[in-house]
Image (cartoon, helix red, strand yellow):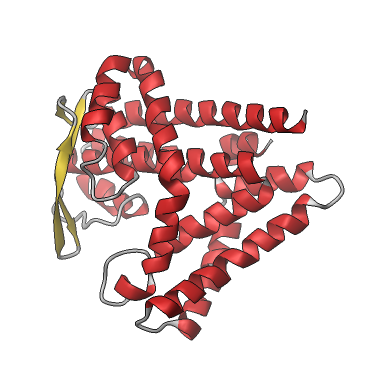
Amino acid sequence: MGLALDAVIGDPHRGHPVAAFGVAASWLERQMWRDSRAWGTAYCAACVVVPVALGVVASRLPGRTVPAALATWAVVGGTTLGREAQGISRALEAGDLDEARRRLPALVGRDPSTLSADEVARAVVESVAENTSDALVAPLFWGALLGVPGLLGYRAVNTLDAMVGHHSVRYERFGWASARLDDVANWAPARLTGWLTVLLAPTVGGTRASAARVLRRDGGRHPSPNAGRCEAAFAGALDVTLGGRNDYGGRVEERPLMGSGKPVSVGDISRSVHLSTLVGRASGVLAVLVLLRRRR
């Protein structure tokens, strides 16, 4: 039911529960921030415990199907991910590079101001690959294992990582615990995403053998212990090359190349969205099967 809600309506523009969590977490950050791992760890724990506790309460309510469906809808974001990516694709196809650059920060943190059309397309495909795990597979994985507490807890962890878990003067120490916890929470889902992508590679014109080869060869090259598995699998399935120079507002990273195919072009965005959608549906089926087996 939750996945159906996401497929039909996606994320609301206002009043989204995850956005409300972000507002509360930002307020708490202002109260707790210190240039300290210990304070950052305490902050991370406080932000995660509350959603998990709410999930425990919700899972014990009579008629718990509705809370579970609403929680699933709130934490998955496959439809919105696809819409954002396709919106950028349409702008590029229309030759409106400025509009594509304007929309890109909804998906990635890099500076879009100097990117070419193909570089924007590469950024979108990389984001779709990584977020297939973050927005679809990972929350369903933890929901299947732990129910509503797992759904809400995972989304809290992943949101904190996006807020404070990156390299900067302010967050290098304070965000350490949030970043490490996100790495742990995404370790298994990222690898599941990679192998589901391999399985579904023929749906976008790729081969399972090629996708598996790129996943094994390149999955560990990425700075992230998890994102590289998703991006490498997508690169192999789509027969493109991902990685290269990324400018994060003055902080430049040279990412290792993944894949052996052609450079990403605008047409690859729609293929990546289609693949992401199918991986999300497959993970949804697996989650339901796990839950049914647990209830026997």
Going 25% across and 25% down the picture, which residue do you hit? 236
- Left or right of 255: which side holds 15? right
Height in image: 269 above or below 11?
Answer: above
Which image quadrant: the N terminus? Answer: top right
Position of residue 23 measured from the top left corner of the image (x, y, whole percent): 53, 70
- Left or right of 180: which side holds 294? right
Position of residue 107 measured from the top left corner of the image (x, y, whole percent): 35, 49
Height in image: 162 above or below 82?
Answer: below
Position of residue 137 measured from the top left corner of the image (x, y, whole percent): 49, 38
Figure label count: 0
- Left or right of 90: which side holds 25? right
Q: Please state which of residues 26 and 222 is positioned toward the viewer in this rendering.
A: 222
Position of residue 36 measured from the top left corner of the image (x, y, whole percent): 37, 80
Q: Quadrant of residue 161?
A: bottom left
Q: Please state which of residues 164 and 73 is positioned toward the viewer in this rendering.
A: 164
Going 22% across and 39% down the picture, which residue do you hit? 122
Which image quadrant: the C terminus? Answer: top right
* Residue 96 appears in the picture as rendered: no
* Residue 115 appears in the picture as rendered: yes
The residue most toward the right is 62
Q: Please state which of residues 219 and 23 is positioned toward the viewer in this rendering.
A: 219
Q: Quadrant of residue 164?
A: bottom left
Going 65% across and 39% down the picture, which residue do you hit? 2
Q: Please state which of residues 122 and 145 is positioned toward the viewer in this rendering.
A: 145
- Left or right of 186: which side holds 127? left
Height in image: 289 above or below 191?
Answer: above
